[in-house]
Amino acid sequence: MIFTKSNKYDKDFLMKNMMGPNCIKILEELTSKIKLEKGMRILDLGCGKGISSIFLAKEFDATVFATDLWIEPTENYKRFKEFKLDDKIFPIQAEAHELPYAEGFFDAVISIDSYHYFGNKEGFLDNHISPLVKEGGILAMAMPGLKEDFVDCIPDELIPFWQDNMNFHSITWWNKLWSESESVIVEKCEALNCHDEAWKDWINCDNSYAINDKKMMEVENGKYFNTISLIARTK
C-alpha cells in the first residue's frame, strides 16, 4: 500500500509520539473504506498523544474530540496548537465507560490501537458507544488481532510476552461480538494491509514498550498476528 497521506507527516514527530503500531498508516487505510466529510464531529477514542486526531482534522477538515484516559489534555492541546489545529481538536481526558458526551452528538467514532482494551465485552458497544452517535453514523475501529484464535493455549514462543489485558482476537471473534449488537449494522470486518508497515514503524521507535514488542514480533515472525478493522453504522 502507498501511504500518500501518511508520508506527508514528519517522521521524527511520528516516531516520538507513537504509542503502538503506526496509527497514521492504520488510519489512512481505515478511512479509505468510509466516507468522512468536512465539518463532521468525530470522537477519536483512545487517541493517545493525538496524532490520529491531527490526521482526522487536517485530512478531512473535521471537528475532533481527542479522548484518552492516560494522556493529559494540556499535553495534547500543546501539540494541537503546534499544528494550528486548536480550533478543530478538543482534548478530553475520560474513561471509555464514562464518556462525557451527549447522546447522538457524533457523526462518527474512530478508534485506533485501543478499542480492544475496553471494548471486548458484550454490551459495551450498545451501552457506551453507539448511543453517542447519530442514526446512520459511522463506527470505525482498528486494533491488533489474531489470524486465528488460540484454541487450547498461547503458543510457547509468545508466553514470555503475553499479558492478560492484550485482548487479541480474530476477525471471526470480533465480527460475532458486533453482529450480536442491537444498535449497529456491521458493514466490514477484515484484516488491514498496513499491518507489517505499521508494526515495523513502531518497533523501530526507541520507546521502551516498542523495544519489548520488537522481541515479541521477532519470535511471532508473521505467524499469528494481524491488524483488524471493524466498520459499522448505527441503526
Image: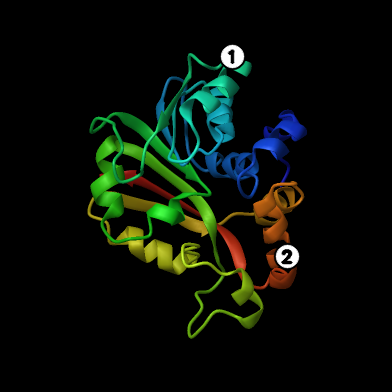
- Identify residue type, mark 1: Lys
Percent of width and height locating residue 97? 30, 46
- In this rendering, would 213 be left or right of 169? right
- Disc number for residue 215: 2
The residue nearer to you, when weighing 227 against 179, is 227
- In this rendering, would 65 be left or right of 123? right
Percent of width and height locating residue 64? 45, 26
Q: Which residue has dot 1 on it? A: 84
- Identify residue type, mark 2: Lys
Query: Residue at coordinates 28% horizontally, 31% vertically from top-left?
Result: 101
Figure colour scheme? rainbow
Residue 84 placement: quadrant: top right
The residue nearer to you, when weighing 217 against 73, is 73
Percent of width and height locating residue 233? 34, 44
- Disc number for residue 185: none
How crowded is the residue under tag 1: few (<14 C-alpha within 10 Å), some, or many (20+)? few
Query: Residue at coordinates 53% horizontally, 74% vertically from top-left?
Result: 148
Query: Residue at coordinates 44% horizontally, 44% vertically from top-left?
Result: 140
